[in-house]
Image (cartoon, rainbow, N blue to C red):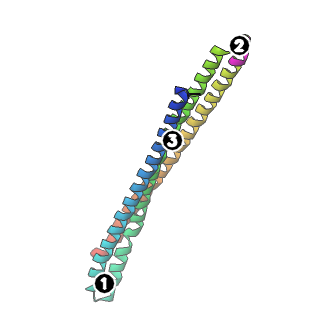
Amino acid sequence: MSTLPTQVIASQKASLDAMLAFQNTAFTSLEKLVDLNLRVARASLDEFAENAQQAAVLQDPQQVLAFANAAVQPSHEKAVAYSKHVYDIVSEMQTQMAKLTENQISEAQKQVSDSIDLLAKNAPAGSESFVALTKSILANANSAYDSFAKAAKQAAEVTESNLAAATNATFEAAEAAKPSRSAPKAS
C-alpha cells in the first residue's frame, strides 16, 4: 500500500483553500453589487413616487416643464456615481484576486524550487550541471514573471489613476454646471 506524502496533502489543502478564497471574494463582490442595485432601485422608486406626488399638484404647463427639467438633470450625476460604485466594487475584487493569484504563484514557485533542491540532494554523481541548469532556468523564469507582474501592476495603477481623474473631472463639470441650471429656477 502507498501513502501520500505530507507535502502533496499540504499542497492539495493549500489549493483548496485558495479556490475557496477566490470563490469567497467573488461571492462577496456579487453581494456588494446586488446590495448596490437594490439600494439604487429602492431610491429610484422612492424618487419616482415623490416626483409623481409633486407633479400631480402642478397645474401650470410652465411649472410642469420646469419640474420635468429639474427631475432629469441629476440623472447624469447619478449614473456617474453608480458607475463609480460599480467600478470600485469590481476594482476591489480584481485587487483581491490579484493578491490571491500572486500568493498562489509564489507558493508554486517555492514548491518547484523545493522539488529541485530535493532532486539535487538525491541526484546521482555527475548530474550537478543539470541541476545547476535547472535552477538557472527557474531563476530566469521567476525573474521574467516578476518583471511582467511589476509592469502589469504599473499599467493597472496608471489606468486606475486615469479613470479616477476622468471621474473627478466629470463630477467637477457636473458641479460647475449646477449653478447655471439652478439660476433659471431662482428667477
**Camera-side residue of 16 and 26:** 16
Residue at position x 37%, y 77% in the image:
69
Q: Where is mark 1, residue-wise?
A: 63
Residue at (33% x, 84% y) in the render: 64
The 10 Å Cα crowd at callout 1, few under 14, some 14 to 19, many 20 or more, is few
Residue 161: percent from left, percent from top: 48, 46
Q: Which dot marks residue 124?
A: 2
Q: Nearer the viewer, mark 3 or mark 2?
A: 2
- Magenta stretch, main secondary structure, is helix
Q: Is residue 36 magenta?
A: no
Q: Residue furthest front?
A: 1
What is the count of numbered marks? 3
Q: Secondary structure at mark 3?
A: helix
Q: Which residue is mark 3?
A: 98
- The residue lying toward the viewer, choosing from 147 and 73, is 147
Q: Secondary structure at mark 1?
A: helix
> x%, y% of residue 19?
50, 43
Which tag, 3 or 1, sits closer to the chain's start?
1
Alpha carbon distance from label 3 to label 1: 53 Å
**Which label sits in the foreground, 2 or 1?**
2
Foreground mark, 3 or 1, reads 3
> Is 56 placed above or below 89 here?
below
On the rendered structure, is 43 left or right of 136? left
- Residue 117, by quadrant, is top right
Q: Range of the magenta residues?
A: 126-131
Amino acid type assigned to the residue bearing label 1 in the image: Gln
